[in-house]
Amino acid sequence: MNPHPQQLRRAIAVLQGLGADPRMLEDDAWRTGHGYYGALAWPMAADGQPTVLLLGARSGLEAQLQFMRCAETRVIVVEPFTGRNPVLSGLRRLWPNLQVVSDVAAARGLLAGRAPDLVRVDGTRHTLDELRALLEGTRCGHLCGVFTDAWADPIALYRLSRDELARSFFWRDDQRRHSFGSDRGPAAVEVSVVVPAYKVSAWLDECLDSLASQTLERLEVIVVNDGSPDDTGDVADGWAARFPGRIQVIHKQNGGCASARNAGLAAARGEFVGFADGDDWVDPAMFAELYRAAILSGADVAQCGYAEAWADGSYTSHRGAPEGIGDWPHVTEDTVALLTERPTIWRRIYRRDMLAQNGIIFPDHVARFDDLPFQFEALLRARRVAMVPEAWYFYRQGRPGQTIGVRDERLYVHFPIFDWIWERVMPSATARVEAQFQRVVMNTHAWAMEMLLPEHRAGYRALMRAQMARQRLHLGRLDLLRLGLRAGRLGIVGPSLVTKGQADAA
């Protein structure tokens, strides 16, 4: 909670009277008023006397505000040149609970084994090893500060803070404008990868070999044998026996790909969850790099590029980030713009808490293409998406039995899919989200009409027109016609909106 503006002005006046550096005081005032160190800058203690440890005095504003909020607060400042700092000398006269020491070892002695409620680290004058030694055997309430890549690898800092140092933490890298934090506690598994498996025994070895070889150490692979009649389950069990702490197998009755993915999702323990199809494979660095991108950007979803792998050994690559973007990772908060992307759930990781909080699962009643509704809802609910350009996922093409090759009434599955999305998302959707939904509908139906054999097109077309006429919220007929015209899909949307009776029924 940020201090009241009046309280902040009074504290600034005190520091000005003590001769604080004007530029640093202005910077600290801005940081304090803008949540620079995260939301938990004001510690509370069970005994009513919080202990605050400041590694670096800066302008003295933080110490003054802590005492103004609670005069019983114990503030320990580590500042190498204590004797030459008139501001600290003045604050010590005002607040007897302020203790100033010149090094971390002395601060550890003052703590006497008690875990501080707040630790703030300024810059890199103190090493990461010193910080670890300072908090050894304890977990502070909240840890926050500024770091650089030269001081600590960001992912190593994240893991150390999460697993050993603090109950919650927030770090900011001013050089790259990255910030990250967590209050979830230690994580035994960072990424869970769910692999639905049905009649893929010929390709499963390559898939699981690539997952077992991931450079991300805290990764679990959950293979869900969806009642496969071949030896898919035996192949999976063999890999689980070879990698008992990394690969596990769930055997279930056949229920379809959506039910298999849901079973894996329910068993997942990771901070993030990803998916891989049993006939595909991935680069060894994929999940480590996606995890890094998600953590450093505070994203709910991270995605990479992918390559379509053809039987002749050729590849067609698709980038995971826009062309010409220099930052790594590229981050967007405009997740609505991503809703029309081709369904490719397997090139991403998703924050598991985000999925659970929004009840995002796969529709069990849908026999195929269940990735479309999952992707639409997950991207819509994500606050931020991190994108990296490299193609790390290899999507096998031309395999017999792939769902993308069907050309009959099985493509009618699109209608329950769009009913599912409409019922779960559209009641609270904006006009822009509805427009994106309609673009997905048009693109999907255009693809289906090209794929369908002639004898199945009339029935599909009738259902398509009825559903599109019915599923409208904010957009009028002219809005949809404009969307169809701009997307080159007028032949799809036009007939659904021509008849007055259909429009009135909608």
Image (cartoon, grey):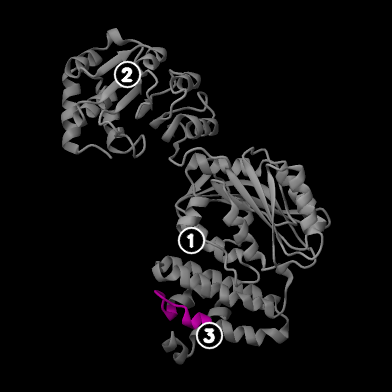
Mark 2 residue element: strand
Check residue 215 for magenta coloring: no
* Residue type (three-letter) at the residue carrying disc 2: Val
Q: Residue at x 35, y 35 (%)?
A: 36
Could you tell me if the residues under marks 1 and 3 are in contact, i.e. CB atoms within 8 Å? Answer: no
Please name whichever residue, 471 or 195, is drawn nearer the observer in this view of the structure.
195
In this picture, residue 449 sits left or right of residue 228 = left
Check residue 469 for magenta coloring: yes
Image coords of residue 217 (percent x, y): 64, 37
Task: Look at the image and give the residue range highlighted in magenta.
Answer: 467-478
Q: Measure the alpha-carbon separation of dots 2 and 3.
A: 70 Å
* Closer mark to the observer between disc 2 and disc 1: 1
Please name whichever residue, 69 or 114, is drawn nearer the observer in this view of the structure.
114
Q: Residue at x 59, y 69 (%)?
A: 364
Q: Measure the alpha-carbon separation of dots 2 and 1.
A: 45 Å
* Residue type (three-letter) at the residue carrying disc 1: Gly
Outermost bottom residue: 501
* Closer mark to the observer between disc 2 and disc 3: 2
Residue of label 1: 359
Q: Which mark is residue 77?
A: 2
* Closer mark to the observer between disc 1 and disc 3: 1
Q: Which mark is residue 466?
A: 3
